[in-house]
Image (cartoon, grey):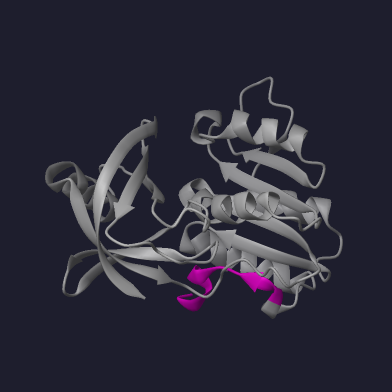
Amino acid sequence: MSVLRCEVKSMKLMTPQVYRVELTPSAPVVFYAGQYLQVVMGENDKRPFSIASMPADQNRLELHIGVAEDNPYSTEVVELMQTEGEIKVEAPLGSAHYRAASERAMVLVAGGTGFSYVWSILQHHLSSTDPRHVVLYWGARQLNDLYLHEQLEQMQRMHENFSYRPVLESPPAEWEHSRGLVHHAVLGDFANLEALDIYVAGRFEMVRVVRDEFIQRGLPENQLYGDALSFI
């Protein structure tokens, strides 16, 4: 892990509540897909965000940051970036990264901006020569919360070993995909989880439910990956 200064290269709203932030670190960052960084707000105030970019690009760090009036934790980070134009980060961190040596099929489960964690893993996997199949389940409340929905549909058409399964709690009337909670869609598709590697990210409450229900369904605990699991 290193402590680095990062220039805020760009900040773009992908939805009214989600920023895509591009950082240029003061030195190359060597990391695994699925790791995270911490924005240093103060000596005892460090806030984690998944690195959404690919490990191949060591001179660029991408973050997806959700903001809301009732969420100062993230909003204050965005305000600091906008005001200062640079931030200090600790990177890389986390042990729930992509397991390239595994031969098991992969399932990626994301809620909201937890997508940034699986986005790095997905891009890295599909850019490799690894033929393992990967299924992405991305759950959100409404369609416009799936801020890369069309790009993922296009990627699914391009890659035979990739399946995209969007899940909405409040879908439009014409919605043809899964409805409800994202982990229920996974359990509906897989009668047996024992042969899978599952990567999960989202709110702690969601990750806790995923852990408990997936292990009850037969998933070995050491085949479930997510840094939130260390805190719940």
Q: Give whichever of 70, 48 is nearer the camera.
A: 48
Residue at (18%, 41%) from the top-left corner? Answer: 82
> Where does residue 99 sit, x and y in percent of width and height?
66, 70
Does residue 78 appear to the left or right of 119 in the view shown? left
How many numbered marks are there?
Answer: 0
62 displayed left or right of 133: left
The residue that appears at 48% across and 75% down in the rendered structure is 232
Vertical relation: 13 (above or below) 159: above
194 vs 23, nearest the viewer? 23
- Is residue 161 or residue 228 the one in the foreground? 161
Left/right placement of residue 232 relative to residue 154 reads left
Front-most of residues 28 and 174: 28
Residue 37: image quadrant is bottom left
Magenta stretch?
A: 223-232
Please report the residue visible at 55 percent of the width from the left and 61 percent of the height from the top. 33
Q: Is residue 228 magenta?
A: yes
Q: Position of residue 178 (x, y in %)?
A: 72, 38
**Residue occupying the point 32% across, 49% down:** 23
- Left or right, 128 with respect to 168, comes to right
Residue reaching furthest to the top: 174
190 magenta-colored: no
Q: Quadrant of the N terminus?
A: bottom left
Pinpoint residue 206: horizontal percent, then vertical percent. Answer: 54, 59
The vertical placement of 152 against 29, above or below, is above
- Looking at this view, name the residue that lies furthest to the right: 191
Q: Position of residue 192 (x, y in %)?
A: 86, 65
In the displayed structure, would residue 200 be above or below residue 181? below
Q: Is residue 2 above or below residue 120?
A: below
